[in-house]
């Protein structure tokens, strides 16, 4: 497995692709979605039903336009999101989660639960209260919904 990883690193190097900081699974994961904004974009798609650039811009965190474009491109290149032309407006793109993106649901729920548990300035809203009562049911319900919506 390590030899295969080394071969991939060489391939990435010669093709100009990104290089992971280390072979630690946590570090490799953070290389993909560990910046300040990517998980918030994923959250907006998963839990808030946002699909377009303009909807992401309206999020309460106020992401800058250049950062949003960059993160959407990264998430698309990492095959976490896919981009397509909106069926309602041909001059607009919409984003959807891929299987790889949907697989981040338990992580997003765990981070949400941890944040509410340890930060008094982040109260549990409706979803947070459901997570507190039965986290596995929330995950399975959302997973079913996401698979149905994004397939």
Image: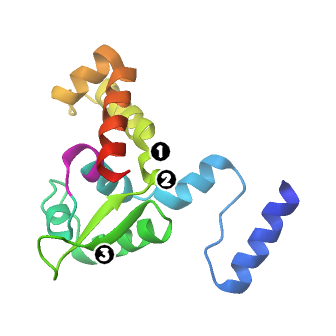
Picture colour scheme: rainbow
Q: What residue appears at the point 32 percent right and 26 percent down from the top-left corner?
A: 138
Q: Can you identify the residue that label 2 sits on?
A: 100
Percent x, y of residue 66: 28, 78
Q: Is residue 37 magenta?
A: no
Is 25 left or right of 150, judged from the image as shown?
right
Percent x, y of residue 107: 44, 39
Q: Can you identify the residue that label 1 sits on?
A: 103
Q: Main secondary structure of the magenta part?
A: helix
Tell me which label, 1 or 3, sits earlier in the chain: 3
Q: Identify the secondary structure beneath mark 1.
A: loop
Q: Can you identify the residue that label 3 sits on?
A: 69
Q: What residue appears at the point 43 percent right and 59 percent down from the top-left corner?
A: 35
Q: Identify the secondary structure beneath mark 2.
A: helix
Q: What residue appears at the point 37 percent right and 58 percent down from the top-left corner?
A: 38
Tell me which label, 2 or 3, sits earlier in the chain: 3
C-beta proximity under 8 Å, tags 2 and 1: yes
Asked if 85 appears above or below 41 in the picture, the reply is: below
Asked if 131 appears above or below 67 in the picture, the reply is: above
What crowding class fits label 3: few (fewer than 14 Cα within 10 Å), some (14-19), or many (20 or more)?
A: few
Q: Residue 116's image quarter?
A: top left
Report how many numbered discs are placed on residues in the image. 3
Magenta span of residues: 45-50
């Amino acid at each position: 497995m390590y030899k295969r990883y080394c071969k991939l690193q060489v391939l990435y190097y010669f093709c100009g692709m990104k290089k992971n900081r280390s072979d630690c699974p946590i570090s490799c994961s953070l290389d993909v979605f560990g910046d300040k904004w990517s998980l918030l974009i994923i959250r907006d798609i998963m839990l808030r039903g946002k699909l377009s650039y303009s909807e992401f811009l309206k999020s309460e965190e106020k992401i800058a336009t250049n950062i949003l474009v960059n993160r959407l491109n990264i998430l698309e290149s990492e095959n976490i999101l896919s981009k397509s032309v909106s069926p309602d407006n041909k001059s607009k793109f919409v984003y959807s989660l891929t299987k790889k993106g949907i697989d981040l649901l338990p992580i997003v729920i765990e981070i949400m639960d941890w944040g509410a548990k340890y930060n008094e300035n982040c109260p549990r809203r409706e979803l947070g209260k459901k997570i507190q009562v039965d986290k596995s049911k929330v995950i399975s319900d959302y997973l079913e919904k996401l698979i149905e919506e994004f397939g």
